[in-house]
Image: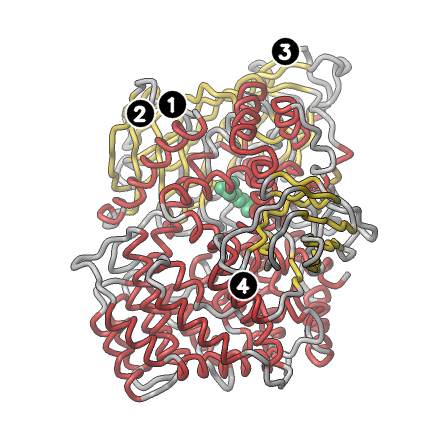
Amino acid sequence: MRSETAQLIKLEDYKETPYVIENVSLVFKLQPEATEVISTLTLFRREGTETGAPLELDGDDLTLVSVAIDGAALAEEAYEASPEKLVVQTPPADTFKLEVVTRVNPTTNTKLEGLYLSQGIYCTQCEAEGFRRITYYYDRPDVLSVFTTRIEADKVTNPILLGNGNPQDAGDIEGTDRHFAVWHDPHPKPAYLFALVAGDLACTSEKYTTASGKPVDLNIYVEKGNEDRTDWSMDSLIRSMRWDEKVFGREYDLEVFNIVAVSAFNMGAMENKGLNIFNDKYILADSDTATDMDYEGIETVVAHEYFHNWTGNRITCREWFQLCLKEGLTVFRDQEFSSDERSRPVKRIADVIRLKSRQFPEDQGPLSHPVRPTEYKEINNFYTATVYDKGAELVRMIKTILGADGFRKGMDLYFERHDGDASTIEDFLKCFEDANQQDLSHFSLWYHQSGTPFVKANGSYDEAAKTYTLDLEQNTAATPGQDEKKPFFIPIRFGLVGPNGDDLAYTSVEGAHVDGDLLHLTEDKQTVVFHGIGSKPVPSLLREFSAPVKLESTLSREDQIFLMRHDIDPFNRWQATQTLMTELLIELTNGEEPAGKDAFIEALGHMAEDKNLDHAFRGFGLMLPSEQAIALEIGKDVDTDAIGDARDAFSKEIGKALYDTFKRIYDAMEMPATFSPDALSAGKRALKLRCLSYLGAAQTEESAVLTKAHFDNADNMTDRMGALTVLVIWQLAGAQDALKAFEARHKDTALAMDKWLSIAARAPSEDAIAAIRTLTEHPAFSWDNPNRIYALIGGFLGGNTRGFHAADGSGYDYLAEITLQLDKTNPQVASRMAKSFGTWKNMNAERRVKAEAALKRILAADQQLSTDVKEIVELCLD
Ligand code: ARG
Ligand code: ZN
């Protein structure tokens, strides 16, 4: 949305609509440049609304053709219409039918919101406020209505016509070369869940029978030629449906479940009722073009959108401030699904890496906001890691606090009590309170108070008294709009690890509520004393990452290495490794020679070869924290070049020191004869590639040859891309040849070329911006497709820290330039890119000056900014 006076939307201003929409009947006469939409709404005046109160409907960029009430055209003075609004001054009756005809242009819709064409396929994206770009409506989630949709289109170019709900009717339109289909969705829904698709699509189908015996047709529609790349997404869908029945008791509720994959899509996917629309990146997979991470991503996103059918669609949000009600909960559900399907600890590590790399920076900078915000200017800016990923952590904490049974009871009550509602976080929490007779009011602060709590732990052992004392402290820095912070309710899972690696039992405890291995930290400071501790323990805190906090431990390096080897909690074994790596890297960045470095490298070698550990786990254990993660840890006056140098040097040092170990693991790994995306095989590939990357970092002649051979012999994308990355990042002999070979092989597969673009964007370069500019000219790149932009530009901003944060400000200048450019066509994508400015305040003075100037240049530009970009830039400058 473009407007000079973007207004602040506030939660406290929430009011119900004066009218209720009972029924919606839509007719779409699809034409590429002039689609007519006939909307017939059955409305009635809500109790409490005064008679004749005006009816005000939302629009965005609409052309009104006609408006009538109960069959009679409205006189001009009876209504007011603009592209943004339709106001009927005095509706004539308590119940009436409003018939509105609008015209829209799908071809020129570059925002990819509302109705648009992607590769000749008509599709829609309505969340959050895209429906108002189709017709005038109460475009807000608390207006639920029953939709019937008739789609008319050319038979040859659009043989497939899809809508929400169940198919009701279809046929030819006599005397024309057009046909129609009618879809009816019996479940009342908000407009953001509306969807329509028309095009010449290929389809794969399966039959599914729900737990109670109801048949469902499952269909996945893709661009023709891609139909042999849907096996994995179909398999993921079926497993998701089964899992939701088993774990949450939730069944599907329509006769068909349709998925459509399109190539131009702003985000991952959308849970429209009965008609999920996906970015094709999250549907299409085969071994030659998709990596193991892609397979995992598909499984997750397919499950996520399917799970929304209950958490999002059957129970939706009262307003957009409640977004985490559906997103946080649904992310939690998809994480649990993947944990059950794969290795739980490995999944947990992956999710925490994601949280720390996306949400922590957000929460420790100018874009920090509560999981449930209270104000915004542009809702599209709030589909954030905080709402999604931290939102999921809050649900996880509820489960941790209440236990699995208590959690399930609360969820059951939520489904029972709120099915069909537009709900709030308060409603949600109340269900857990009522089902468990527990007070969650202190816990609920997590939804309202932003920022990452820092928890400090200091332990001491009293040999004579056999007590172990833990001094705990929490502190949350001020965040925008919240200067004073109250203490959070932080569930800390823990163990006191004895000398032989077993957890020590305690006889009694004082100073905190402690239940088994769960401690409740509820105050700013708490001293917890454990009695009956027979020998000096090493505390293992925040096991399973039981709360989204930053733990500052005062453990010695020896104790960390001890946990890395012996903790019974795999998550904390990994965490100990990461903590050590981070500490060492920061000292190296500061030009110091860290104590205990050799002992750590030795321990790393042991872990790499530990056959008792999952391959995937070992792969994660070997992974150094990213440059951004180190930057965040340093927190202020960051010099990204120093970080990059230190990290490169440390990789090289580890590579050299453990060269033989890595080579041994690499050579000994037994791989299945044919590719399979299962977790075990994927874990083996990941570990093998991690070893290869250290060998590559050592930059020996042998390792260059080995890496190039790995690339040449790869029979799947994971290995091909992994080896290519090593060649390019470490600038090994053969890198250029490999880039060319990859391009030749995949030039016709856009999703594969995205990987090539993102690797190229990370390549070390004297003039990174010149390199990126050249890449934007490459035939594989296009400014019109979000996936290409995310791959190349996103790959640069997120993966080329030296380039983006170059001290001369060239990276910031470039980001300002493309933000302005993209804002003219696709504000959502532009603002997503602009969010990379979110860490600028952590940089050193030299860089801050440049970043601030670039941000100010965006605001001062001689063009009308979208509310999307304007809000982000203003928040960054605040
Ligand atoms: N609800 C979608 C999901 O599954 C995402 C929609 C994102 N919409 C947006 N305007 N950014 O998470
Ligand atoms: Zn979602």
Q: Nearer the viewer, mark 1 or mark 3?
A: 1
Q: In x, y percent, where is residue 869?
A: 65, 57
Q: Which residue is mark 2?
A: 216
**Which of 61 and 223 lies nearest the eye of the viewer?**
223
Q: Amino acid at mark 3?
A: Thr
Q: Which residue is mark 3?
A: 95
> In the image as oriented, which residue stretches furthest toward the left?
673
- Seen in the picture, residue 613 relative to 236 is either above or below; the reply is below
- Seen in the picture, residue 370 relative to 853 is either above or below; the reply is above
Q: What residue sits 48% from the left and 53% below the top?
A: 568
| Mark 4 surroundings within 10 Å by alpha-carbon count, few (fewer than 14), some (14 through 19), many (20 or more) | many
Q: Quadrant of residue 606?
A: bottom left
| Mark 3 surroundings within 10 Å by alpha-carbon count, few (fewer than 14), some (14 through 19), many (20 or more) | some
Q: How far apart are labels 2 and 4 at the CA level? A: 47 Å
User: Residue 576 got which mark?
Assistant: 4
Q: Amino acid at mark 2?
A: Val
